Image (cartoon, grey):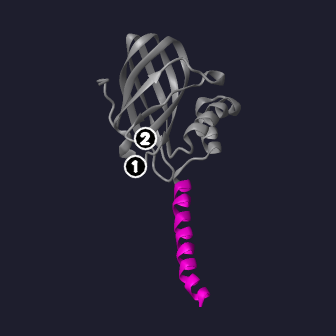
Amino acid sequence: MNLLRLVPVVLVAAALAMGAATPVTAQSDRTFTQNEIVGAASDFFGTTTAAVAKAVERIFAEQGLPDAYIKGDEGSGAIIVGLRYGSGWLIRKGREPIKVYWQGPSVGFDVGANASKNFTLIYNLQRADRLFQKFPGVEGSYYFIAGIGVNYQRAGGITLAPMRTGVGLRAGVNAGYLSYTREQSLNPF
C-alpha cells in the first residue's frame, strides 16, 4: 500500500526532471562554447589562438556562455571629449547575421585616436531587437596578452564584453556610452 502512494510522487519527480533538462538543452543550442568563441575570435583578429584564449577564458570565468557576438571594425578619437563609430555583424546560432552599427560619445582624461577590430561577446540577448539601445561603460588601458583590451557594458539585463585590438596612439580613461542601431548614424547621441 505504501508503494502505491509513492508511484505518483516518482512520476511527478521524473516529469519535473525531464522538464528541467529541456531548458538546459535549449540553452546550449543558443549559446557558444569557449572553443567556438576562441576559434571565431582568433580567425577574426588574425592572432594566435593562445593570445585570444587568455582573454576569452577570463570573460567566460566571469560571465559564462554568450548567446551572441558581434564582429566588426571601429574608429575612435578624443581630446577630453571623444567619439566612437563602428559597424559589424551580429552572429547568433541558427540565425542569419544582422548588420549592426554603433556610435557614442565619451568624456574623460583621454587623448588620441585609434582604429580597432572589435569582437563583442553578448550575454542574455535572447532577441536581436534587445541589442538596439544605449550601453554605458567605462574604458581604460587594460590589456590582456597580445594587446587585446576588454571592458564591460551593461543595460536592460544584457552584458556586452567588447574585445578590441588595433592601431593608434591613445591614452587615458573615459566614461561614455555606445548606441547600437540598425542604421548608420553620424549623430553620436
* Helix, strand or loop at mark 1: loop
The relative height of residue 25 versus residue 89 in the rendered view (above or below) is below
Point out residue 77 in the picture as x, y percentages from the top left corner. 42, 14
Task: Give the number of callouts.
Answer: 2
* Residue sitting at x 61%, y 35%: 56
* Helix, strand or loop at mark 2: strand
The residue pinned by badge 1 equals: 127
Q: Would you say the residues marked 1 and 2 are in contact, meaning their CB atoms lie under 8 Å apart?
A: no
Magenta stretch, residue numbers: 1-29
- Left or right of 178: which side holds 30? right
The relative height of residue 177 versus residue 157 in the rendered view (above or below) is above
Point out residue 71 in the picture as x, y percentages from the top left corner. 50, 35
Q: Badge 1: how crowded within 10 Å, few (<14), some, or many (20+)?
A: few
The quarter of the image holding the C terminus is top left
Q: Is 112 or 167 nearer to us in this picture?
A: 112
**Residue lying farthest to the front in this orientation:** 2
Q: Is 188 or 99 nearer to us in this picture?
A: 188
Point out residue 68 in the picture as x, y percentages from the top left corner. 49, 44
Could you tell me what secondary structure mostly forms the magenta stretch? Answer: helix
Is residue 8 found inside the magenta-colored segment of the image? Answer: yes
What numbered label is drawn on residue 158?
2
What numbered label is drawn on residue 139?
none
Q: Which quadrant of the structure image shows residue 80? A: top left
Distance from disc 1 to disc 2, alpha carbons, whole Å, reads 11 Å
The quarter of the image holding the N terminus is bottom right
Q: Which quadrant of the structure image shows residue 21? A: bottom right
* Residue sitting at x 33%, y 31%: 184
